[in-house]
Image: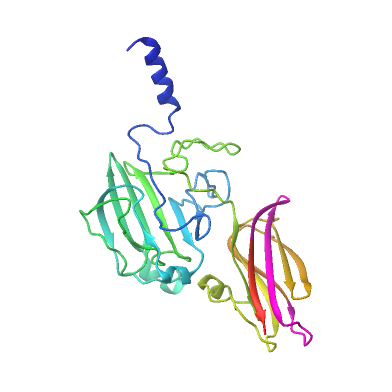
Amino acid sequence: MNLGALASLCLLLAASPLAARDILQNPPIACDLHTDCYIQQYVDHDPSGAAMDFRCGPLSYDTHSGTDFALRSIAHMEQGVDVIPAAPGTVRGTRDGMPDQVYAPENAAEIDGRDCGNGVSIDHGGGWTTQYCHLKRGSVKVRSGDRVRLTTVLGQVGLSGRTQFPHVHMTVRKNGKVVDTFDPDEHITCGTPGTQTLWQTPPPYRPGGILTVGFAGAVPDFDDIKAGTASAETLDLTAPALVVYAHIFGGQAGDIIAFRIGGPKGLFMDETVVLEKDQAQLFRAVGKRHRVDWDSGTYTGTVRLLRDALELSAGQGFVRIP
């Protein structure tokens, strides 16, 4: 090889997003990250007691060591969503049998030391391992020593271990050290995030968004919203109110939530709410008390999440009054 060709090859390798020894990965969850599920939290890159994701955003918490691929509701979890390997490898170990439950002070003792809940660990060779946590009880389908491919079902997304929402937490390690798949070189530049990743195709980064929009006859309980049971398809004239709500992730102080309800005869109500603090998950609701002159027909709730005067996300819900 002549020196010119060698120099060209060196430049090509230097520009390559990955070194040959690295592994390319895929999302470990069988869902559409644009519609059915989303990423709630990323690896924490802030060495202090605060938290920062790889784009210098707040979608993380102190010492968080992985990426959380979350479902919109417990109802979606109960339908069954598969967890799959991020890359081929060999199963190192598994755990199953822990219950699916929201982590709380009353069950903390039984979870202590088993924060991952039901899970699977995979060896990919070359010092690379992945760990998958919070799987549904009774869903783990592999055993230690099994060879797994990208299509192998490891289990299903659950609510086991130290968690408050259904998701699969994936931690990637190289020789025991946590690696952020989105920014493996750890050279964080807030304005221009690095292009080098460990993904075959990097999942979309969503700095926040609307998960669900629904109607209810009163302000719903947040637990019911997270369970996916709060929304009503119809409301009769005995309902105390007509309320539209939005379930949101990644809310930041100053965000504007714009609610609009259209009724059979046009605009029914138009209202905005401003968030006062950052919140990983939240809901807001607006509505009107019952009136006897409400019109029968279909009502449409449109909710927009605005940040710095730009629309970040939008969603709609519908209800019918007979």
Residue displayed at 42% across by 70% down: 79
- Judge left or right: residue 314 versus residue 132: right
Residue displayed at 53% across by 59% down: 35
x%, y% of residue 164?
48, 66
- Judge left or right: residue 44 versus residue 4: right
x%, y% of residue 6?
37, 15
Question: Within the magenta stretch, is there residue 290?
Answer: yes
The quadrant where residue 178 appears: top left
Colour theme: rainbow
The quadrant where residue 1 appears: top left
Residue 219 seen anywhere in this rendered image of the structure: no
Depth check: give the residue in front, 123 or 268. 268
- Considering only vertical position in the picture, is 240 above or below 184? below
What secondary structure prevails in the magenta region?
strand
Depth check: give the residue in front, 12 or 196. 12
- Seen from this angle, which residue lies furthest left? 145
Residue displayed at 44% across by 58% down: 31
x%, y% of residue 120?
31, 57
x%, y% of residue 102?
45, 70
- Which contiguous range is marked in magenta? 288-314
- Judge left or right: residue 80 versus residue 50: left
* The C terminus - image quarter: bottom right
Number of labelled discs?
0
Residue displayed at 36% across by 72% down: 99
The quadrant where residue 139 appears: bottom left
